Amino acid sequence: MAATFEKANTYVFAALIIRDREVGGSNPLAPTNNSHSIGQTSVTLEADVAVLAGENRFTAYTFNRDNVKSRDATLSVIGANSLRRPGTAYVLAIGVNTYSNQQYNLKYAVADATAFGDAVQRAQQQIANYERVEVASLVDEQATKANILKALKLLAETETNIAADAPAALQKLKATQPEDAVFIYFAVHGTPHGQRFYLLAHDLG
């Protein structure tokens, strides 16, 4: 899919294509990129977007460097029934009782994360909206920053390789498709910093 933004009389800072309420593709265009500089009459964004069976509603828009949003451009595409596929529900449950710095240890975080995974699995199996329910649990020493980020990247398909010694939970995660669902649960410490709130992995230091 391609979206062209006409009369781009200022830098295009970010441009996105959205399917329904999900980001189908995005491509931030840096102000230093001369091909998208001031005075250019149009900017074209191309993104690979999966088409589902039934109606697919797409919206494209952009922001300039002053964070002013353009008007929406919309498109509706009807996907053939042959495109229909069963979905998978992925449950990523993260809990840390034992931290590398023991003064942060907790008592019930792992039990909470495990209970959440079990509860979602039972509920989804009863509802039967998805062909499979995969529960991937990262607890205690497995719930490192690297492993948590790896899990998210596997689901987002920004990474596909898994090391042979990686936790078994990571082996369950695949690149998600539009028909899939992802449930993420954290039972860990958290801390504010500035205007952000951070979750603390096992290896907090």
Image: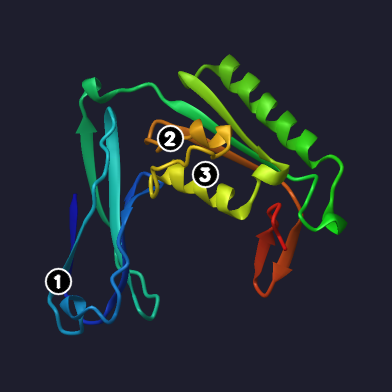
Q: Which is more N-terminal, label 2 or label 3?
A: 3
Q: Are marks 1 and 3 in contact (CB under 8 Å)?
A: no
Q: Amino acid at mark 3?
A: Ala
* 132 with respect to 94 (left or right): left
Is residue 180 positioned above or below 40 on the image?
Answer: above
The residue carrying pointer 1 sits among few (fewer than 14), some (14 to 19) or many (20 or more) residues within 10 Å by Cα, namely some
Residue most extreme to the left: 41
User: Image point 30% across, 75% down: which residue?
Assistant: 30
Disc 3: which residue: 151
Considering depth in this image, is 135 or 15 the residue closer to the camera? 135
* 11 with respect to 123 (left or right): left
Residue 186 visible in this rendered orientation of the protein = no
Disc 2: which residue: 174
- Residue 151 in the image: state x and y as whole percent: 52, 44
Disc 1: which residue: 42
Residue 35's image quarter?
Answer: bottom left
Any mark on residue 205, and which? none
Q: CA distance from mark 1 to mark 3?
A: 38 Å
